[in-house]
Image: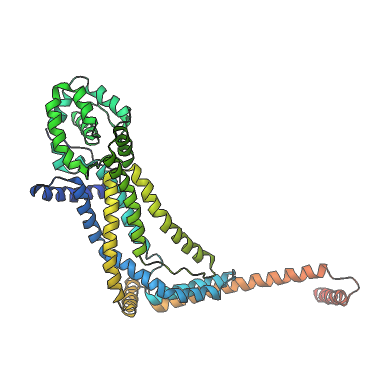
Amino acid sequence: MDIILTQYSGAILGPIAKLLGWVMNGIYIVLDKIGIQDIGLTIIILTMIIYLCMLPLTIKQQKFSKLSQKMQPELQAIQKKYKNKTDAVSRQKMGEETQEVYNKYGVSPSGTCLQLFITFPILLALYRVIINVPAYVNGVKGVFSNLVNAIYTTDGFDKILTDYVDAGKINNLTSKMVDFSAKDTTAVKNNIVDVLYKMPSDGWNFLQDKFGSLTDLIQTTHDQVEPMVTFLGLNIADSPLSTIKSSFASHSWLMLIGALLIPIISYVTQVINIKMMPQPQQTQTGDSSTDAMAAQMKTMNIIMPLFSFVMCFTVPVGLGIYWISAAVFRAVQQFFINKHMEKIDLNDIIAKNQEKMKKKREKLGISEEDMKKAAKIKTKNISYEASSKEKEEKLKEADEKKKHVKADSMAAKANLVREFNEGKRQEK
C-alpha cells in the first residue's frame, strides 16, 4: 500500500512548501538515477536552484544599494536644511524634496524590502519540508513501506511508539503530534513514518528490542534509510544539540565535533556573507530617524550571525545545511556581482529607472504635471493652516505680555488708550 503523508497545509507556507518539495523530489529522482541517495546533497542543490532563481532580484537590490550611496549626500543636505524644523510646512517640504531625490534616481524608498519578504517565507517553508521529507520525496517515503505495514500489524505497537515519543527521544516530535489510535489506517501509517524518519541512530536498536520478530526487516530498512538521511555522519532530521548530548553520552567525539561544526560554520559563513555585501555609509546625518536606521542596520549585521549560530543548535541538521550552503552560495554569487557592479554605469541605470517610473504613472493615468499641481495645492492648504495658527499664537502671546506689564509704565498707558479707542469703535 502506498503511503501518502500529510503535507503542511498552511495558507501561506503550505503552497511554498509543496513547490519546494516538488523541486526537491525532482532533484532526488535525478540523483537516484546516478546511484546517489542523499537528502543532504539534495538540499544543497535545491539551495543553489533557489538562489539562482533569485539572482535577478539580488542584482536589483545591489543596484538599489549602489544608488542609495550616491543619493546619500543629497538626502543628507535636505535633512540638514530642515534640521530642528518641526512645523507642518517644513515637514511637508522636506518630504517632497526627499521624494524628488528618489524620483530623480528612479528608485523607491522600500527597494531593499522585497528580497527579505521572499527569502524568509522560503526558509520557513523549507523547514516544514526538511522535518517531514517523506511527505514530499517519494523515494524516501517508499523505503519505509514494508516496515510500516509490519509494525502496524503488530499488537501493542501504538503504546510502544507513544511511550518512546513521550520519553522525548525524538527531536521536534511529541505524542500530541502523532495519533496511533485513529480509525483512518493511512493516517496511522503516516504517523509511524514520521516516527521512523525522525528516529535517532540508537532508536533503531530500540525498535529491534521491542519488535523482535521484525529484526531483519528493521535492519534492512535502517541500512537503506541511513545513507539517505545522513550527511557527513549526521542525521539531517536530528538537531545538533540532541546529537551533541547523545554523542557525549556514548563518547562519540567525532560525531560531537561534527554536530558542533554546524552552528559554528553557519556563524562564520553568515559573517563572511555580510562582509561581502555593500554596506551603507556610516555618517551622522543630523536626522534622528536616519541615524537610528543606520545604527539598527549595524546592529542587525551583528545579531543575524549570532541568531543563526543559536538557532542551528535546535533546528534539524538539514536546515543548518541549507543555512550554510545558502551563505556560501551567496558569498560566491556576491563576489561576481561585486565585479559586475564595478562595471555598471549608474547614470544609465538612473535613466532607465526614471523611464520605468514614468511609464508606471502613465498606466495609472498620472502625469508629471498632475503630480506637481497636487503637491502645490497640498502645500498651499498646509501654509494657510499654518499661518492661521501662527496668528492665533501671536495674539495669545500679546495677551500674555499685557498681563505682565507694570501699571504705571508707558506700555500700560498705551494699552489703556488702545482699549479706550476699541470701546469707542464698538459704541459706534
Determine the residue positioned at 20% across, 41% down.
229
| Residue 15: percent from left, percent from top | 25, 48
- Let me know if residue 294 appears in the view: yes
The one nearer the camera, 180 or 357, is: 180
State which quarter of the image contains the N terminus.
Answer: top left
The one nearer the camera, 101 or 362, is: 101
| Residue 126: percent from left, percent from top | 27, 48
The quadrant holding residue 411 is bottom right
| Residue 68: percent from left, percent from top | 40, 71
Task: Report how many numbered discs are placed on residues in the image.
Answer: 0
The quadrant holding residue 183 is top left
- Looking at the image, the residue that sits furthest to the right is 408
- Let me know if residue 181 appears in the view: no
Determine the residue positioned at 14% across, 35% down.
223
| Residue 90: percent from left, percent from top | 56, 73
The one nearer the camera, 221 or 81, is: 221
State which quarter of the image contains the C terminus.
Answer: bottom right
